Amino acid sequence: MSHSRPRIDTAGRRARLGRRHLLAPACRAGRPEEVADALVALHATDAATVHLAACARLTVPDPAEVERALYDDHTLVRLLSMRRTLFAVGAGLAPVVSSSTGRAIAAKERAGLVGRLATGVGWDERRLAEVEEKTLAALTARGTAAAAELTEDVPALRESVVVSPGKPYEATVAVSSRLLRVLAAEGRVRRGRPRGGWTSSSFRWTPGTAFADLPAPPAAEARAALARRWLAAYGP
């Protein structure tokens, strides 16, 4: 006796994804955290995409709800991970994502910063550590601050380095932007509320907890767990 496998056509796949990804009207979510869990991660390089992705799947679309999750409750966490891209994930998944890819990327970001500072402004790792300590102390004292405010407290942050030298997109940037990017990748600072509205990418910064200090599975286990989550959300 032969058994034929069910055949799922394009319309069937779309219907399944519509339910899994909370796009079907009957499947909308009540909170942004539910959206992040359903999609595994929300693209966050552009500040507006987190809000748009979440609101498209909420029963009552409201950017303020996304801001609550990101900046008040910290139940959504931005971190640099797969493909060196910024994502927003549920707080419970953040240590897994960090262990799977984030920590290795943060290490590469730090190594790149050390190299740029050595050739650009003559800093060694000891000098970088001193500036980092002063920056974190200034941020803790202020509670929240824009990069420009931190440069008032730590003048060394005003120095500049050239990134992508010789490339068409070569640029000269302030040390502050690169240093804060590395500290954010490590979880030692976090992006706070933007200086403008929810579409602004000019963030204020707040102190954070290093991802390395959070309990997480070993990297191989974390990658397997993340793959299972992705297949459950996007697989056949």
Image (cartoon, rainbow, N blue to C red):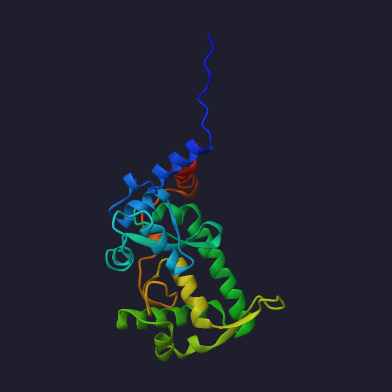
Residue, far top: 1
- The residue lying at 50 percent from left, 79 percent from top is 177
Left or right? Give the position of 156 relative to 112: left
The image position of residue 138, as x and y in percent, is 36, 83
Say if 49 sits above or below 125 in the image: above
- The residue lying at 54 percent from left, 88 percent from top is 159
The number of callouts visible is 0
Left or right? Give the position of 88 relative to 58: right
Say if 25 sits above or below 54 in the image: above
- The residue lying at 50 percent from left, 46 percent from top is 220
The image position of residue 32, as x and y in percent, is 33, 57
Give 111 or 9, whichever is nearer the viewer: 9
Left or right? Give the position of 76 relative to 186: left
The image position of residue 53, as x and y in percent, is 41, 58
- The residue lying at 59 percent from left, 71 percent from top is 112
Give 79 or 44, whichever is nearer the viewer: 44
Residue, far right: 166
The image position of residue 157, as x and y in percent, is 48, 86
Left or right? Give the position of 17 relative to 138: right
**Quarter where residue 2 is shown:** top right
Say if 72 sits above or below 27 in the image: below
